[in-house]
Amino acid sequence: MKKNKKEKSRLDDVIKAMRRGNREGQQEVFGPGFHSTNRIHRSKKTYTRKAKHKGNDVD
């Protein structure tokens, strides 16, 4: 029984170390703070009032 717990704790430690390393790598690339990994693909037809999104028709 103890052997099984020991193996599980090692696996948990490995997973934690990998996550920590991945997080540190992301912070080196993107800087500190939260950055989403998946962004929603917006349709061209999605309405927005901002002038910068309206295209060439802006005066």
Image: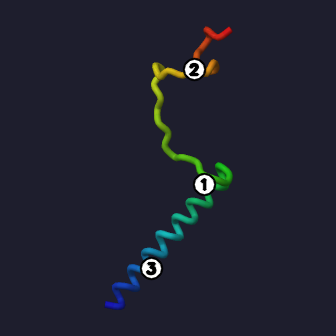
Question: Is residue 25 found left or right of 4 in the rendered image?
Answer: right
Nearest to the observer: residue 33 or residue 3: 33
What is the C-alpha distance between the residues marked 1 and 2? 33 Å
Residue 47 is labelled as none
Q: Which residue is mark 1?
A: 26
**Amino acid tagged 2:** Arg
Q: Which residue is mark 2?
A: 49
Q: Residues within 10 Å of mark 3 (few under 14, many from 20)?
A: few
Residue 5 rendering spot, x and y as whole percentages: 37, 85
Q: Quadrant of the C terminus?
A: top right
**Amino acid tagged 1:** Gln
Residue 39 rendering spot, x and y as whole percentages: 50, 39
What is the C-alpha distance between the residues marked 3 and 2? 53 Å
Q: Are marks 3 and 1 in contact (CB under 8 Å)?
A: no
Q: Which residue is mark 3?
A: 10
What is the C-alpha distance between the residues marked 3 and 1? 24 Å
Q: Mark 3 or mark 2: which comes first in sequence?
A: 3
Name the element at disc 1: helix
